[in-house]
Image: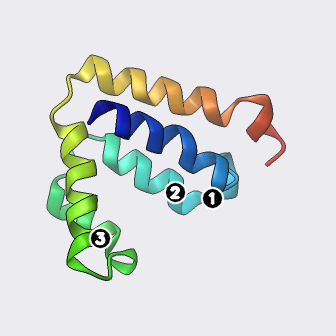
Amino acid sequence: MKLLAVLLLAALPLYCSAGAGCQLLEDAISKAINPEVTLEEYEVALQEFLHSDADRNAAEQFKQCFLNQSNETLDNVRLMMKSIYDSTYCRAF
């Protein structure tokens, strides 16, 4: 499950012109990583994109992955996202 989360976080910004190019994606990732955001709050934040039970289930599982992690792991994910956003591949966006 950790590998899935890492792959999603690594791949999504590349498809969405990460950095300032896709604020919706940045917000969704930020809320997923933030342990103070509950499952319910996360679902409300993504409500316009969740059209089916399968969508809601996937969002819940994605958020739950981060709720199950230690603060050290969450800090490492934040660092990884910053590194992606600041990379030469995303800098142009």
The quarter holding residue 92 reads top right
- The secondary structure type at the circle numbered 1 is loop
| Left or right, residue 56 beside residue 88 | left
Residue type at numbered disc 3:
Asp
Residue type at numbered disc 2:
Leu
Determine which residue is flagged by label 3.
55
* Numbered tag placed on residue 2 in the rendering: none
Residue drawn at (36%, 39%), measured in percent from left and top? 5
How far apart, in angstroms, are the residues tagged by discs 2 and 1?
6 Å
Q: Can residue 40 be seen in this view?
A: yes
Above or below residue 88? Residue 37 is below
- Which one is earlier in the sequence, the residue at label 1 or at label 3? 1
How far apart, in angstroms, are the residues tagged by discs 1 and 3?
20 Å
Residue drawn at (65%, 36%), measured in percent from left and top? 85
Instruction: Find residue 18 and report its horizontal and vertical position in percent.
Output: 65, 48
In which quadrant will I find the N terminus? top left
**Numbered disc in front, either 3 or 2:** 3
Residue at the extreme right of the image, as rendered: 92
Determine which residue is flagged by label 1.
22
Q: How crowded is mark 3: few (under 14 residues within 10 Å), some or many (20 or more)?
A: some
Residue drawn at (20%, 22%), measured in percent from left and top? 70
Q: Do the residues labelled 2 and 1 touch (CB within 8 Å)?
A: yes
Residue drawn at (65%, 54%), measured in percent from left and top? 15
| Left or right, residue 74 beside residue 30 | left
Instruction: Find residue 80 and report its horizontal and vertical position in percent.
Output: 51, 26
Q: Can residue 35 be seen in this view?
A: no
- The secondary structure type at the circle numbered 3 is helix
Q: Which of 20 and 80 is in front in this view?
A: 80
- Which one is earlier in the sequence, the residue at label 3 or at label 2? 2
Q: Are marks 1 and 3 in contact (CB under 8 Å)?
A: no
* Numbered tag placed on residue 25 in the rendering: 2
